[in-house]
Amino acid sequence: MTNIFAHFSDEAETARIYALVSETPISERTHQRAARHADVISRQRNELVDRLAQLEGQQDSLLDRITGGLN
């Protein structure tokens, strides 16, 4: 997921620079679209990281219960 985010982040940055240089409405829209896409990917990545942390916590709790019952 990090590589995907890096790709879209780079794409948005390239579009931003192109929009600054060319100063056309089309390039500005392209930049805005790329920036929105990178933002969505970033939010999805953050949600997945949070969810993984929750699942790891649940897994640790369940493993503690299992090993506690074995003693």
Image (cartoon, grey):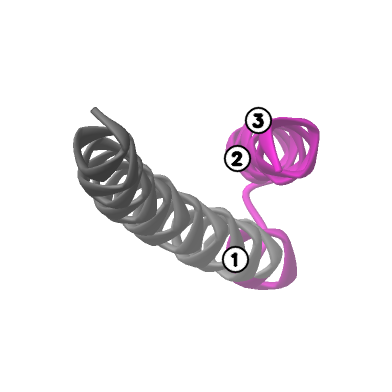
Labels 2 and 1: the sequence-earlier one: 2
The residue singled out by tag 3 in the image is 17
Q: Residue at x 37, y 43 (%)?
A: 56
Q: x, y (%) of residue 19?
A: 65, 45
Left of 28 or right of it: where is 50? left
Q: Residue at x 35, y 41 (%)?
A: 63
**What segment carries the magenta color?**
1-29
Q: Which mark is residue 47?
A: none
User: Which is nearer the eye, 61 or 16?
Assistant: 61
User: Residue at label 2?
Assistant: 16
Work out whether residue 37 or residue 3 is closer to the camera in this orientation and state it.
3
Q: In the rendered structure, which disc, 3 or 1, sits on the residue that comes first in sequence?
A: 3
Q: In this picture, is 45 found above or below 5?
A: below
Which image quarter holds the C terminus? top left
**Nearer the camera: disc 2 or disc 1:** 1
Does 49 sit left or right of 10 as displayed?
left
**In this rendering, position of residue 26 left or right of residue 23:** right
